[in-house]
Structure formats: structure tokens, C-alpha cells
């Protein structure tokens, strides 16, 4: 299947810019332009410079080029990850990160200034906080949908993420009345699974800067394992051999600990049984158990230790070698769980030209919609870089990416 939209994407790639940058500017884009930091490379240098002072462990953690374009385009849902938020607020003192992603209406030549905090006098009552004054109220607010979810888990919930997509980009940040650790009215052993999950979601709202609407929708998915973030990165060398790396950030909304994550990988062309190993960056011990092996198909399980307990978030990563891309360049990523954010990265090395690239999102009912609006194609010193991102996916969906390349004549 071909897409006419891809021709414009490829031409924009050759000009060194993204089609997403033509949207109405956000404050962050304007501020970066006035500092001459609007290119990804310049931004990364400034990111590392600020990170070296704020938190040296964050150096090199800047966003990918595709994610950076999403920031500037105004299409970002919610706010960046907390580490990015810390660096952005250090990069622009006086600005809150939610203000940086608001629409800028003052013209490109007008440098915006951060809003002045409103002061209260002794005779003026203080402004009411945007969140509940009592931390336990936040927990109680999500308890009911969690308990109902345990009784009747969502099954193909069509509304997952739909209301959030329609929300304004400038989502209200969770109030400071949402602490990372909510006051514990009883010991962990005395709490019900629903109470533990409710407390975890309240803490998560602060750490990931989630909106109230998104926390409520997560609460409705009680009884499921939710992928907060799934990333698949494929590195293809000049002979077509590949290394596929997966990272699953899992949120356990069930009443039982997660000890095992089942997966499968398939390639049309292989050099024999696929090599699958856990990534050394795993937060927990991960062991790979092969359950079914053929030359081009492997079904396996990731055993996780310690298990991911009720309400906990943990990342499980692994990589696969031995698969080869020969003639047909495509990747179909199935979605087995409710997935908040999916990223598919392709680096195809030593190519002469990227001729075509399309992305399709398959719906749970079998229909298909184009995902080209979330597709970014760029080049990096002779490597073709392709990234597609999608949000709020349901089980039984899939993302299919197809691309065509040519190589320079020898």
C-alpha cells in the first residue's frame, strides 16, 4: 500500500525539517527560536549543558528527533516525561513546563514572558488548589472505578484515551497536594489491592504529570496489565541483519503479582534460531524461557524477579538478533495490552535514498487508519531514520510500518 503523503514527508526530510513544525507555535518553540536552538542538534547540546548542572545523570537523555518535533508541533498529549520536565524548567527559569507547551499567540517576533505568580494579601483568602486538599481524597476518587474494574474488567473498551485525545494540549498539572507518597492510613499488608492501586495512581499522576482524566481512565482499566510505554527499536546493518530491542514499561492493575511476560518474534529470513537475551539495563532480574522455537519464529517468556506487585510500575527490556530484512522492508507491531504510548524506531544503515514510507494503524475491529501524521523520516550521515508513535491503543490492534530504500551503486 502506498501513501501520497509520504512523498511530501521524504521531500521535507531532504530539506532537513519536519512537516509537524508548520503548526501554530507553542511557547517552547518560540523561546528556542529566539535562542537559535530550534534544531534538534543544537537543542541536544543545550540539554546536556543544563543537565550537567542540574543532574549529571540526565546527560545524553535528550528526546529523540521525532519526539522533539512532537514537542514543537503542539501535538504532544499531556506533558513530557518528568526528567525532561526538570531540564526544560532549568533551561527556562521562571517557566512551568505546562506553560511551555501552551499556544503562543503573540507573534513570532514577540518573546513571551512567564506569568507572574498571583500574590495574596492577608485580607484576601488564598486561591483554592486545583487538586484535593486532603491527599486521601485523591485516593478515594479513583477507588470506585478500580473496584468496579475488578468486578467486571474492561473488554475492548472503545473509550480508552478518546476523551484525552480531545483535551487541550495545556493540561493542568497535578496539584502539589498530590505527594509522591500518600499518607498511609493503614499498613501495606492491611490494604486491599484496590487501595494499593489507588495510592499508586495518585503517586503516578505526580511523577508522570498525568491529567485527572487520564488517571480516571487508568483506574477503569483495573484488572489489566497496562503498558505505560512500549518502545521497539530496530537497527538494520548494510547487509540487512538486525538487532531488535524492546522496552516495556508495565503498570500492574491486577490483584496478582506479574512474574511472567509472554512474547513472540517472527522473521521471514533468519540465520537459524533467533538469539533473544535480556537487556543489561533491566531494573529487575529477567530470564528468557524459550517455549517454542522454529528457524524464523520464537515464542518465549520473560521471567521477572522480583515480581511486579499490585500497583507497581517496572520496565522489562530484551533484544533479539538473527533476523534479516532482504526484499520486503516492513514491521508489524501487535498490541497485546492496553498501551498508553507506543514508539517504533527504525535505523536502516548505509542507504542511498528512502523512497517511500507508510504507517497504518489496525483497529480492533479489523479496519485500518493511516498513521502517517505520526510518522517522521530523517537521515543521519547516510542512515535512514524512521519513527512512528501512537497513543492509547487497545488489545488486538497493530501498527504496520513499510519502507523502501535504495543503496548506492558499488
Image (cartoon, rainbow, N blue to C red):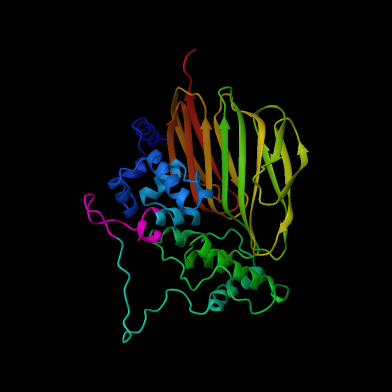
Q: Residue at x 72, y 37 (%)?
A: 298
x and y percent of residue 404 in the render?
48, 27
x and y percent of residue 73 in the render?
36, 48
Q: Nearer the viewer, residue 381 or 171?
A: 381
Total numbered labels placed on residues in the image = 0
Q: Residue at x 68, y 27 (%)?
A: 270
Q: Residue furthest top?
A: 410
Q: Residue at x 35, y 84 (%)?
A: 125
Q: Quadrant of residue 172?
A: bottom left
Left or right of 344: which side holds 265?
A: right
Q: Where 134 falls versus 47 (above or below)?
A: below
Left or right of 300: which side holds 45?
A: left
176 magenta-colored: no
Q: Residue at x 30, y 43 (%)?
A: 36
Q: Where 167 falls versus 231 (above or below)?
A: below
Q: Where 123 falls versus 118 (above or below)?
A: below
Q: For the magenta stretch, what is the residue range?
A: 91-113
Q: Residue furthest bottom?
A: 123
Q: Nearer the viewer, residue 296 or 377?
A: 377
Amino acid at each position: 500500500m502506498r501513501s501520497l503523503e509520504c512523498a511530501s514527508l521524504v521531500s521535507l526530510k531532504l530539506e532537513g525539517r519536519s512537516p509537524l513544525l508548520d503548526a501554530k507555535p507553542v511557547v517552547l518553540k518560540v523561546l528556542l527560536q529566539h535562542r537559535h536552538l530550534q534544531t534538534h542538534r543544537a537543542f541536544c547540546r543545550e540539554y546536556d549543558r543544563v543537565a550537567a548542572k542540574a543532574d549529571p545523570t540526565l546527560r545524553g537523555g535528550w528526546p529523540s528527533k521525532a519526539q522533539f518535533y512532537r514537542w514543537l508541533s503542539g501535538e504532544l498529549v499531556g506533558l513530557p516525561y518528568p526528567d525532561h520536565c526538570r531540564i526544560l524548567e532549568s533551561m527556562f527559569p521562571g517557566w512551568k513546563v505546562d506553560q511551555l507547551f501552551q499556544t503562543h499567540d503573540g507573534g513570532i517576533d514577540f518573546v513571551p514572558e512567564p506569568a507572574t505568580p498571583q500574590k495574596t494579601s492577608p485580607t484576601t483568602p488564598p486561591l483554592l488548589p486545583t487538586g484535593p486538599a486532603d491527599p486521601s481524597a485523591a485516593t478515594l476518587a479513583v477507588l470506585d472505578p478500580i473496584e468496579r474494574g475488578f468486578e467486571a474488567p474492561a473488554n475492548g473498551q472503545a473509550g480508552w484515551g478518546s476523551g484525552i485525545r480531545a483535551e487541550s494540549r495545556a493540561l493542568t498539572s497535578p496539584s502539589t497536594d498530590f505527594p509522591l507518597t500518600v499518607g498511609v492510613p493503614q499498613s501495606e499488608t492491611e490494604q486491599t489491592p484496590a487501595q494499593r492501586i489507588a495510592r499508586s495512581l495518585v503517586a503516578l499522576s505526580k511523577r508522570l504529570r498525568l491529567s485527572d482524566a487520564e488517571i480516571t481512565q487508568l483506574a477503569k482499566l483495573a484488572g489489566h496489565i497496562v503498558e505505560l510505554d512500549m518502545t521497539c527499536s530496530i537497527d538494520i546493518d548494510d547487509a540487512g541483519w538486525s538487532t531488535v530491542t524492546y522496552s516495556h514499561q508495565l503498570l500492574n492493575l491486577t490483584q496478582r503479582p506479574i512474574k511472567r511476560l509472554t512474547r513472540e518474534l517472527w522473521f521471514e529470513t533468519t540465520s537459524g534460531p533467533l538469539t533473544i537475551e535480556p537487556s543489561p539495563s533491566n531494573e529487575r532480574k529477567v530470564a528468557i524461557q524459550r517455549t517454542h522455537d522454529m528457524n524464523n519464529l520464537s515464542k518465549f517468556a520473560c521471567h521477572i524477579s522480583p515480581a511486579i506487585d499490585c500497583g507497581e510500575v517496572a520496565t522489562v527490556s530484551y533484544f533479539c538478533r538473527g533476523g534479516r530484512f532482504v526484499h520486503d522492508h516492513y514491521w508489524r507491531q501487535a498490541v497485546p495490552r492496553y498501551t498508553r504510548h507506543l514508539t517504533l524506531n527504525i535505523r536502516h544503515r548505509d542507504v542511498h535514498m528512502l523512497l517511500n514510507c507508510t504507517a497504518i494503524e489496525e483497529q480492533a475491529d479489523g479496519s485500518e487508519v493511516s498513521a502517517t501524521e505520526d510518522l517522521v523520516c530523517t537521515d543521519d550521515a547516510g542512515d535512514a531514520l524512521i519513527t512512528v508513535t501512537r497513543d492509547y491503543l487497545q488489545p488486538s490492534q497493530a501498527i504496520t510500518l513499510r519502507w523502501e530504500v535504495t543503496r548506492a551503486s558499488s
